[in-house]
Each structure stands twice: as structure tokens, then as C-alpha cells.
Amino acid sequence: MKRNYYVYALKDPRQKPAKIFYVGKGTGSRSIEHINKPDNTRKGKYIKEILTEGFDIIITKLVDHLTEEDALRIEMELISCLGSIDNNGILYNSITPRSISSKLKPNNISLPEDAIIKAQLGLKLIKEAIVSFINENPQGITNSNCAHYLGLQSDNEGRQQDYLSYSILGLLINDGTIKSKKINNRRIYIKNK
């Protein structure tokens, strides 16, 4: 099992001591990519702000020589502990989708603080697995392939239901990662080039 993953923190040097504002996992030069190519997320905008003021982002490897699974678990725990700015935490990690954050209003539903973070990180990992599966099968895969081979099948009172994989495939289509096409009576999912 490869142990080439690490968990890192990006820190704002304008504060003393430098304040962590992002936690991530990766391999190779992943931690530096955020700084070399800041995107238009709130994390990217925060990085641009720091760089524009003439400061260098501090990158700290928190844990090294990890499996991907261990790195994800540590990343998730750190994000859960430190919290994102969506839930009054300090991290600029984008965890809570807009579709959820707009529904987070006081009501009769009790939601543990880390539930959204854990669910979204789990969803991210399942999406990555499906994309890897599609990349290995350029001819395309079906929802049934996805549910069966990735262990996403469910059993609803004795009836097989593959709604989980179908829903995630839909999310991947919506964000432009994959596309679907109909061949005969089957819908297949392929990489969106």
C-alpha cells in the first residue's frame, strides 16, 4: 500500500502566530498548487489578498507518509475540529454546498456540527472513485456498473435500488465532470473532455 500522501495546512503570515486558514491532503506538489494558481474560490481570493499585500503563504506539512485513506481521515478530522467559515470556524475550505447552506435555518431539525463536513468529504471521495472508474473505462460505464463494482448498491425491503450512484452521477454531470449519452436502451457515462 502506497504511503505517499500528506496532510498540510496553509497559514496566513500576517497574524502572529500565523493562522491556519486551509487544510488539505495531497501528494507531490499539491500544497503549493493553491499558491501558484489561486482559483476564484474564497480560499483562492484569500490567497490572492495575502500575496497582493506582499506576504508569502506559509505551508506546513502536518503529517507525512500516509495512505490516501489515512490522509482523508486526518483531513476530515482537522476540518471538523477547526470548522469552516460556514459554521463559524476558521478554515476557508469549501465544504458546505450552497444548496445546503441556504437551508441551514433554525427549525426542528438537529444537525451535529460535523455532520455536513463528514458527509461532504465522503461525497467528494465517492465522486473521485466514480471519476477514476470512468477514466479507466473510456467506452463508458452504466449506473449499474457503478453501483455494482463500487459497492454502492442498496437493498430496500428486498428490492435493489441504485439511487445513490445515480444521484452522484447526476451531480458529476451537473458540475461538468462527466456526461451521459444513450446507446440503444442504456445510458452510459463518460468523461467530459
Image (cartoon, rainbow, N blue to C red):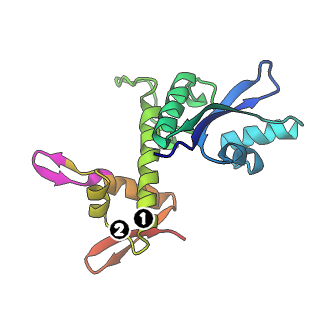
Position of residue 59 in the picture relative to residue 154 (left or right): right
Pinpoint residue 49: horizontal percent, then vertical percent: 80, 38
Residue 132 lies within the magenta run? no
Segment tinted magenta in the rendering: 155-164
Q: How many callouts does the rendering have?
A: 2
- The residue tagged 1 is 134
**Residue 102 visible at all:** no
Q: Quadrant of residue 84?
A: top right
Point out the residue furthest to the bottom here: 184
Q: Quadrant of the N terminus?
A: top left
Local SS, label 2: loop
- Crowd around label 2: few <14 · some 14–19 · many ≥20 (10 Å): many
Q: Residue at 73% of width from left, 48% of height from top?
A: 38
Q: Earlier in the sequence, mark 1 or mark 2?
A: 1
SS state under label 1: helix
Instruction: Choose top left, top right, bottom left or bottom right for residue 54.
Output: top right
Location of residue 39 in the rendering, given as x and y in whole percent from the top left corner = 70, 49
**Residue at the left extreme of this rendering:** 158
Task: Check disc 1 and give the amino acid type.
Answer: Ile
Most distant residue in the top direction:
16
Q: Which residue lies under the disc numbered 2?
A: 141
